[in-house]
Amino acid sequence: MALMIRRVTSDILRIFGDRFLSPEEEKKRLGSITSTDCMPKDSSMPLNEETAINPKGRFWIEAYGCSSSMNDSEIISGILRNEGYLISKTPYDSSVNIIVTCSVKDATEHRMLHRVKKLTELGSPLIVAGCLPKAESRKVEALSPFASLMGPDTIEKVAEVVSSAISGQRQVELEVNESSPKLNIPKIRLNPVVSIVQIASGCLSECSFCQTKLVKGNLKSYRPGDIVRQIKADINQGCKEIWLSSTDNGCYGRDIGSNLASLLQQCCELDGEFKIRIGMMNPMYIPQLLSPLLDILLHESKVLKFLHIPVQSGSDRILRKMRRGHSALTFMKGVQFFRERIPKITIATDIIVGYPSETEEDFQQTVDLLKKTRPDVINISKYSARPGVLASSEKKVPSHITKKRTHTLDKLAKEISLVRNSQWVGWTGNIIIDEVKDNFIQGRNFAYKPVVLDPTHCKKASICALSLGSEIKVTVSKFTKHALWGNLL
């Protein structure tokens, strides 16, 4: 459906699978969803009578990629609703179709191009937004020559682009002289209790494998006051989870005389019952943030005990080739520092397997680092060369070797996750429900661990007690590698 009313457990939220649904399948999938399910949650965007009777048109939107891409789709939807457009339930009867894309990996790009092709075949005006058209506009144009294009920093022009597309005029908006902060703008949330707040655009890194830097450029931190105002408004509208999102949260504020810890402290001073999830932060910034970040994690109950620190490799030689700006020891000391003081903190990391010239020794160093640090979540990606980046011209590791190493890490990651999750059995505490779907109910605890409620217990509870955003008390009775299972008390 165009706007999700539940959230999957990954940051990578996909509106569709890889296969495009037929009208009959789409109708069955949507079930009893009505237009009111996609209504905005904030009072600043009421569905007035004029819009309901004489809408400018209907739009369909689907989004892929990171939480920032998801937030971009929320903002696009909010702007268009404010301009008098209504949300279409399917892409088959819409006035215009919009896809917010991701191009972080080769496989992701292929999936995006497949979606662009399928949406083009429907015959409705198409707008391709996000990272892909900015990074690979020629590939998009080859598949959909009449599609309008928008980059990540030009979404404020979406009403103009949509109007042009509906009238048969192609518009390309990929560059911008100075982008505006993506804050305090109308938006329609994918999940009514989750507020995705972008705190910056771009980063300070020069990673040899990353295309995102080419798309989003250098760091542009948003002002703390603007961020706090956005969060305050979202809390007042019922949000319980606040996701601070950017390309790299670790470098936030370095261009405006601030930092992540200072921003977090200001956010925690807001009134209300809510939890803040800190987004990805590169290890190179951990040493400078250790003490102030620990102080906040220890003493601020509003900040989830969760850190996403992508190490990418355990080999210092490979890390230097990647231009990561940190060593394996930097990551290990950071994890040990937080684990010693907050034993149940959830640590997530990312690993790239098969980076050019990676030897067996390099790979074994990665295995050893993961065994020593034992991250709760290990996101594993096979290396794929992205056009325009420094590493794209280097000789690849043979695919069969990369595949074997990936299998080894997958197995290790599952083992580590099982052990880490097993330590929660018997824990009793509160969770905030952030996902409700049919007979599936899930919440998050103070360490952002997903806790799935036993269906037999859910049936006994009132609907009100198990609604999105409710805080309930549970006891963890069992676990899997992906989640904890709890009984309602």
Image (cartoon, helix red, strand yellow):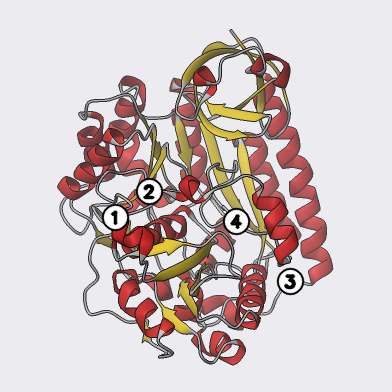
Q: Does residue 133 appear anywhere in the picture?
A: yes
* Image point (74%, 38%), residue name: 414
Residue, disc 4: 14
Between disc 2 and disc 3, the foreground one is 2
Residue, disc 3: 397
* Image point (79%, 49%), residue name: 408
Q: Is 364 placed left or right of 289 in the picture?
A: right
Q: Are marks 3 and 4 in contact (CB under 8 Å)?
A: no
User: In which quadrant of the rendered image does the C terminus lie?
Assistant: top right
Q: Is 290 placed left or right of 149 in the picture?
A: left
The numbered mark at residue 186 is 1
Residue type (three-letter) at the residue carrying disc 2:
Pro
The image shows residue 369, relative to residue 198, as above or below, that is above
Q: Earlier in the sequence, mark 3 or mark 4?
A: 4
Near mark 3 (Cα within 10 A), the count class, few <14, some 14-19 or many ≥20, is some
Residue type (three-letter) at the residue carrying disc 1:
Pro
* Image point (59%, 29%), residue name: 442
Q: Quadrant of residue 168?
A: bottom left
Q: Is 399 placed left or right of 124 in the picture?
A: right
Q: Quadrant of residue 169?
A: bottom left
